[in-house]
Image (cartoon, rainbow, N blue to C red):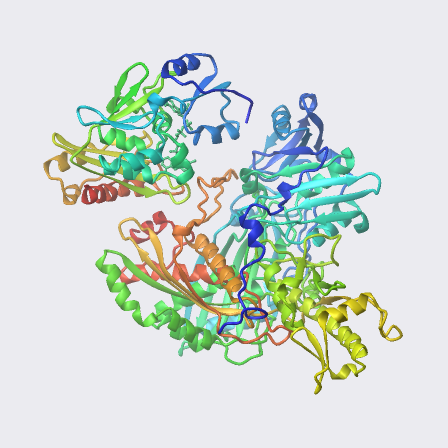
Amino acid sequence: MPKDHGIGASPKRREDLRFLTGTGNYTDDINLYGQLYVHFLRSDVAHGRLNKVDTTDAAAMPGVVRIFTGDDFAGVGGLPCGWQVTDKHGQPMQEPGHPVLAQGKVRHVGDPIAAIVADTYEQARDAAEAIVLDIEELPAVIDMKAAVQDGAPKVHDDLTSNLCYDWGFVEENKAATDEAFKNAAHVTTLELVNNRLVANPMEPRVAVGDYNRSTDESTLYTTSQNPHVIRLLMGAFVLGIPEHKLRVVAPDVGGGFGTKIFHYAEEAFCTFAARQLKRPVKWTSTRSEAFMSDAHGRDHVTKIELALDKDNNFVALRTETYANMGAYLSTFAPSVPTWLHGTLMAGNYRTPLIYVNVKAVFTNTVPVDAYRGAGRPEATYQLERVIDKAARELGVDPIKLRRQNFITQFPYATPVAVEYDTGDYVATMDKLEQIADLSGFEARRKASEAKGKLRGLGINCYIEACGIAPSNLVGQLGARAGLYESATVRVNATGSISVMTGSHSHGQGHETAFPQVIAEMLGIDESMIEIVHGDTAKGPMGMGTYGSRSLAVGGSAMVRATEKIINKAKKIAAHLMEASDADIEVKDGKFHVAGTDKSVAWGDVTLAAYVPHNYPLEDIEPGLEETAFYDPSNFTYPSGAYCCEVEVDPDTGRVTIERFSAADDFGNIINPMIVSGQVHGGIGQGIGQALLEGAVYDDNGQLLTGSYMDYAMPRASDVPFYTVDHSCVTPCTHNPLGVKGCGEAGAIGSPPAVVNAVIDALHSAGKTNVTHIDMPLSPNRVWAAMNA
Amino acid sequence: MYNFDFVRPKTIADAAAALGHEGAQALGGGQTLLPTMKQRLASPETLVSLTGIPEMQGVCKADDGAICIGGATPHAVVAAEVAAHYPALAGLASHIGDPAVRNRGTIGGSLANNDPSACYPSAVLGSGATVVTNTRQIAADDYFQGMFTTALHEGEIITEVRFPVPEKASYQKFEQPASRFALVGVFVAKYADGVRVAVTGASEEGVFRWTEAEEALSANFSADAINGLTVPADGMIGDLHGSKEYRAHLVGVMTKRAVAAAA
Ligand SMILES: Cc1cc2nc3c(=O)[nH]c(=O)nc-3n(C[C@H](O)[C@H](O)[C@H](O)COP(=O)(O)OP(=O)(O)OC[C@H]3O[C@@H](n4cnc5c(N)ncnc54)[C@H](O)[C@@H]3O)c2cc1C
């Protein structure tokens, strides 16, 4: 019998009731008395000198309260970058300014130039049309390799070039790696593109700024994955508002996928303008604006080389990647192609020598930052594609080649600076072979061929580093913040519990899963526990949700705080039963004196804590509320093996996903249903990247895929019913729950499986000259590759 | 969106009169026009809704057997009510957009707009249908005049479309991955006096008849009859979803599939 409560049970998600019945409270649902609306006039050229912004006529338009331009922000800070990368020569990265509204130059289509605040949104838009812009258009730099050529136009005039950094990792490995390539029995080389993506959460970004004159307090309601971080960045670096006068609320958030981590100009603007105008100011992004102002994801151009010895053992790996930063450094942008990518290049394999080179480049495009997986999908994709290519070149089975090179001893210190604590890659591969019914593949291929379709099978293995992150380690790597998490467990007098977590739920199901942990620890009913998040006024400083960290880091903080609660409650219970607290056991919501039939109920203990008439006041304080901050000692390393089966229509090149199986090791599982849901969503996004999605700029920096007419999102009919399994469990050794995190795995593990499957399908039809097709594998691209 | 006035006449005559005023524009289901207005790319002073006119709603059968569809009939109604009479046409309607689009978007709006990737134009041209307006009848061959261009005069209203029912027909749509409009769509209809093949989505000139294929299929209505026939890539649309060559190739593939599926 599966459990029906506590850890390991799958209660339905309690938050879905409000999400599915339209009673959620999203930022756009917040409307304040006297609220004004802002519309941003955005650049429609990719690169230009901003000679003049004439707002005279516009300012006189009906309803216009005030028009702000870059000049209004002269005395205000720019948007800060949260990570500094040091290049291979030991120099800090080039770090340009990032004004809230453009100053002097516009640097991408969508760069905000002026903010029109008016009584209604339509009035603001009307006035925007009356603003007269004098922009001297400059040549745009779009292609990364062209951008770093001598003489290329510079995105930022005050930098020496468009190269943000040239990073070598691990620089000390370089010579030995190059030497190993010289002596290798076989070298496989692959050049590929990790396509630029637009996250497209269902809810676009929204910000409402408010200012209270009587208290001098500012409040920002915003669609954020990490409100405390926004408060810190915006308060300390942009607007100079001390934290005790600044509250940031991220209420229900309709999906983030990374793009709502970052601190954006629009939310800083609304907070600033509300203070200036002494009225609430609201901005709601349109979908078109989202395409040109939400940070994009991925966009790497990579050459990877794998060296093998005569027995097909991996001996060395070398990569060179151009990573697009876009026009400005978004909050975490520099860390994505470096510390979230280079450190993952060992994958699941015992490759002794690895050297990763990354050139981060400024271009006249929307800034690029973390998107579900952030760096790890890029690492996995190139590694698993090159392994597949090597297997074909060597004529060995791709599963066998992988198995032969798997890491099998743990802990394992990789040559790229991380130490995997646990994992069992053989077990997940065994599980995959079983759930994917690999033995039945040939029969399925024949059945497809009978229909005139080519069938292919693609395998992928991944590890990822999440549970982000050990603060002292990331500090050495350039992080300008800590990455611990906090929790306050507030037990109320009658025994119900409010848990304030610094992590944030924007669809993940924390409100359901987190109570399962605490209920298990205390032996009480989950319905007595409420999760509170998303408001800097309610909980202690926390770092938010991304990097599959909420349970591994935030959940660990919750466990620590609950342990403190239990310790204190035991003392109270011992006092009530006149026993020694060492003899008290917690079971089924009661405190028992071990070896006796004496017990006292949870509610009696909690009541005693707040009505301390009979209470050990000389030993402990009244009340029952504890806070813990948890800083992990290592990343967590979920891993898995994925299998995709596709059919390719040889007449049209159209690819359909016929089967998809995922065997993941996420460590211990709290709520298997939610975990499956996370994997489903991640695979869906990965299939989107592999087959459909791709943001494309033309040479002038116009975004050709600026709406759903041209940017292809995956739909339900594009994905099959998945087979997912997470029964392979090697618990994380260094966090109290033994959990690893599951939020990004699907998006990391699926794209290579899809592409490997398509290449396999083409090879089955004798198209062995097709060694690679860049994502998205659109029908046109597949057809063109087949007919090249 | 800019401000506009809104009228909802009950007769074609009143609608025609309303459209006679400067700045007035017809509104069908609004599935094309309203997004354009929201993006401030269109700014009619008055919208004249055609969906409240009973004469322009629904499906009927004429004495000569033709299927007559009111100009303001939504795609979903065509999908449901034409199925028994002209399955290929109903099938086409049932694959336009999503349920919301099909419940609002109208045949008249689609034809007036004449998007080069829209589905209906291929059925109208492929069936040799007649576009009936408030002032005249226009043969399909005269109606389509290039991308977003038709024989309609300013303010002219499509009140009805008459489709002669073929012996066999099929519409095969290869979807553009993002918009799910036709990257290439081919409508093949076999009549007693010959076969018509109309192609949408592919050409820079909008929907067109593939006469070579028509001749070959009129002589031998089988997919093999197309073997060896190609449309030139020159003049095809080339964009990030499909090159000219790819579209030209798909015209052949979809034509064959339409012939094979014709019922
Ligand atoms: C998400 C989405 C997906 C879609 N997918 C497809 C698809 O796969 N295939 C496809 O073919 N189409 C597709 N469409 C377009 C859809 O079919 C539209 O409904 C159609 O193009 C326009 O019809 P409408 O009634 O909405 O016209 P409106 O938007 O109201 O009007 C369009 C134009 O026609 C004029 N007009 C409207 N009615 C008449 C009339 N009776 N006489 C004269 N002029 C008139 C208007 O003045 C306007 O210029 C899609 C649309 C959307 C929003």
Q: Quadrant of ligand 1?
A: top left
| Number of numbered tags placed on the structure image | 0
Q: Is residue A411 visible?
A: yes
Q: Position of residue A206 (x, y in %)?
A: 63, 42
Q: Above or below — where is A233 with respect to B57?
A: below
Q: Nearer the viewer, residue A657 or A672?
A: A672
Q: Residue at x 63, y 37 (%)?
A: A112
Quarter of the view holding residue B57: top left
Left or right, residue A698 beside residue A120 = left
Is B85 on the left or on the right of A439, as rendered? Answer: left
Q: Residue at x 71, y 73 (%)?
A: A601
- Image position of A367 with respect to B138: above or below: below
Q: Is residue B236 above or below residue A559?
A: above
Relative to the observer, which residue lies in front, A393 or A36? A36
Residue A79 x, y percent position in the rendering: 70, 46
Q: Is residue A737 left or right of residue A663?
A: right
Q: Is residue A253 above or below residue A286?
A: below
| Foreground of the two, A671 or A525 | A525
